[in-house]
Amino acid sequence: MNKRAALVCSALAALLLASSAANAQSWKHEALVDKDIEAEQYSKFWEETLHGFDGDFDGLLEQASELQRSRMASQKDLALPVLEQAAKLKPNDPRVHYRIGNHFQRLGEWKACARSYTNVFELDPAFRAVGSTEVPLDEGLGLCLLYDGEFEGAITHFRRLITQEHETPGIQLRYGEALMALGRLDEAIFSFRRAERLAQRHSRNLARETEYALGVALDRAEQLGESRAILARLTLRDSQLTTLYSTDKVYAPASEELYYLGLAYEVQGNVPRAIYSFRRFLSLAPNSPWSSHAKSHLQRSAKAKLAASLDLSGSAQWPLEALREAIRQSERPLRSCLEGYPEVLVTITLSSPLNRPAVAHQARAAIRAETSAPRPDLNKIVECLESAARKIRMPKQSGLIGGHGTAEFTILGTPKP
């Protein structure tokens, strides 16, 4: 560590020591803190600390590295002004623009990271980052272009990586996603199959993500049999669709998430959620090249009956078909509560304890809604559904005395006639 880096570490240590000393007195009384003054002092501390690096480009890069390696998000964020100061000193040095691109990529600011990585590429197309954890320039730039919607540019950089023998399952997957976004399905399917074979040797999660993408691409290519077989196998192992809902998953474009979910729910037999997902997809991406496919799925799903998918749990249960029929007999009052609200998806949970003698009886109903409808409308919908659900004539339960059973199903609102 050089002298300037040591200066920063010493300053940080002094700041932390002072903070610890203040905290040691907190048992006596709670200190009053002026947040504005505290923020001003904090800013002044960093200005004075970093001032020692004025004119020292390598020192600024080293300090930015220290901040970016921190486990604290607030420390990581401080790296950007340090890097910007370094960029003023040497605007034509690709290292600093690469590091700025890293920073924006971590934050998911795709346009900014694409701009920074493009600066690097224009300064040195053969730039190689130092360090085993640093991504290749073409990979970082390709990802940022992909998630910013610049699919042609992303394809160019992913292809460079593949031809330069830097192929990985992740790169092949993203390459396929960029191809599919442009409607180049045959090439996308080939890339997904290649990514799947590679991923089997590397990561189960990545392999599963790739299989979902392949299932969607085959659906759009009208290879419905293979698509459904792949998705049926996936959703059996991944019943909660955690792969699709993962916070680490980024879709390109963002509306793709809804198409993926629509297909997965359709295969699971959860028709209301499938319809809900496809409707939202069409609302967000009406000009998508896949809008006609989404409409076809909506037409097929619209023929399904209420309660086609029922989730039963607990130590006491109702006979499945008898319960399904009981719910369908109350279909009209349930649907009337949601008439005029096609954007509302409701999950209804029926629950009841098992007593002896077992008799047909009413069950308690809990309503959970997913919607952007105004709160007064939502309150009215929930009140109406609770009343209608309580009138469902539940069949007799089976199981242990004192046991408890629940049944859950979804229902979707409809447009006004």
Image (spheres, rainbow, N blue to C red):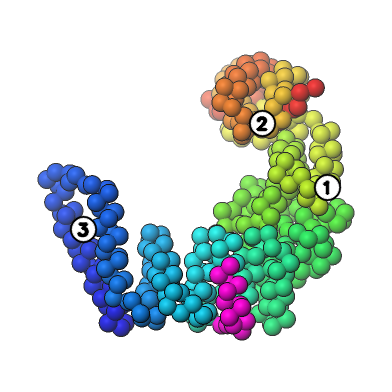
Task: Tell which residue pokes out farthest to the left in this image.
Answer: 28
Hey, what amino acid is under mark 1?
Answer: His
SS for tag 2?
loop
Disc 3 designates what residue? 19
Q: Are marks 1 and 2 in contact (CB under 8 Å)?
A: no
SS for tag 3?
helix
Image coords of residue 245 (percent x, y): 61, 50
Q: Quick one: 316 or 49, which is closer to the camera?
A: 49
Q: For the point 35% across and 80% down, which residue is it?
A: 55
- Above or below residue 338? Residue 114 is below
Taking the image as drawn, is residue 406 in sight?
no
Q: Quadrant of residue 388?
A: top right
Hey, what amino acid is under mark 2?
Answer: Val
State whether the magenta stretch is mostly helix, strand or loop.
helix
Q: Earlier in the sequence, mark 1 or mark 2?
A: 1
Q: Quadrant of residue 201?
A: bottom right
Q: For the point 79% across and 30% down, which residue is it?
A: 305
Q: Give the spatial CA distance, label 3 vs label 2.
A: 50 Å
Q: For the point 30% across and 72% down, which residue is it?
A: 51
Q: For the point 15% across and 58% down, which residue is it?
A: 21
Q: Earlier in the sequence, mark 3 or mark 2?
A: 3
Please report the bounds of the magenta region as a residue range: 115-128
SS for tag 1?
helix
Q: Give the spatial CA distance, label 3 vs label 1.
A: 60 Å
Q: Which mark is residue 293?
A: 1
Disc 2 designates what residue? 344
- Above or below residue 261? Residue 175 is below
Image coords of residue 322 (percent x, y): 74, 25
Tell me, yes or no, whether the highlighted magenta stretch contains residue 243.
Answer: no
